[in-house]
Image (cartoon, helix red, strand yellow):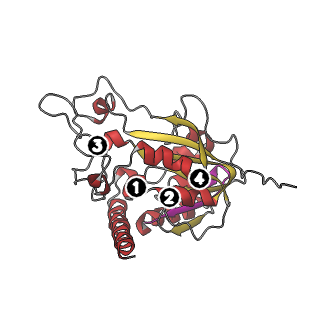
Amino acid sequence: MFEKQIRSAAHAAVVAHNTRAWDRLADTKAALARPAADAAFTDPRKWLGAGGWLAGEGQGRSWLPPRLDGLEVLCLAAGGGKHGPLYAAAGGRVTVLDCSPAMLALDRQVAAERRIDYQIVQGSMDDLSMFGTGRFDLVIHPVSTCYLPDVQRVFQEVARVTKASGLYISQHKSPTSLQASLEPGARGCYELRHAVAGRHAAEPLPPEPPSRLREHGTQEFIHSLSSLVGGICRAGFVVEDLYEPEHADAEAPVGSFGHRGCFLPPYLRILAKKQAAEPRVTLV
């Protein structure tokens, strides 16, 4: 019981720390805390599949339903005035959940400016108790699992609130990318510096200077493929596709985001479908 209380307190401290960090990022208008551009609203459904974070999806295969009209959509840990407004403008009945009040304030601002109606909820991505079982047809989950030390609870909660045969589309920081140095060492190689298993994997990564790979002031944790892909499966989903978005640039300067992407794809994108409940067999 005492160990459980310690873990609970440590978890609460991480959530509180990252909430404050994202509030600061929103207040300073950091790149990942900027609302959707005006051009995205010209054809929001097209932008979501072609120009947004789902660009490329499964190398040509569309992951989103052809139409979002009337679908219950949860944008999970997705405050900032980007995902929620666009999915709502595309016809979805959207709920946005995020831990950061400042990021959610951006959603309220965009919703008011564009007269778009959707639900905005403050909370942690691993506690969806405010939502009923089987409520959502589609859960959209941009990069955020790295901000919690344990992700299995996240996937279990997502599975509970997703309808049978509903879709869960998530993106994660690649464990290998998080293990490696941000810049090449003396030999010109990116070096693996951090453990993905054992005691050290349960500790947050050391702070790094702000970059496209690490968000300033946040506490981040490495999660193995067993925890990410396996965790989604264990929660009751079937993985239908998996994709590493292309960020490589062979002509980019050494040490840049594009150069590093030639060796270490930074993200992992997963398409999963909630399994339908197996019918009960009655023996007579």
Quadrant holding the C terminus: bottom right
Query: Residue 171 appears at what percent x and percent y?
Result: 47, 45
Residue for point 49% across, 63% down: 126
Of callouts 4 and 1, which one flags the residue occurring earlier in the amino acid sequence? Answer: 1
Judging from the image, what secondary structure is the residue with disc 3 in? helix
The Cα–Cα distance between marks 3 and 4, rounded to whole angstroms, is 28 Å
Say if residue 268 shows up in the picture: yes
Residue type, numbered disc 4: Val
Front disc: 1 or 3: 3
Judging from the image, what secondary structure is the residue with disc 1 in? helix
Q: Which residue is mark 4?
A: 139
Query: Residue 88 appears at what percent x and percent y?
Result: 62, 55
Q: Which residue is mark 1?
A: 33
Q: Residue 135, located in which quarter of the rendered image?
A: bottom right
The Cα–Cα distance between marks 2 and 3, rounded to whole angstroms, is 22 Å
Q: Which residues are magenta?
A: 88-99
Query: Residue 229 appears at what percent x and percent y?
Result: 49, 44
Q: Is residue 57 left or right of residue 255?
A: right
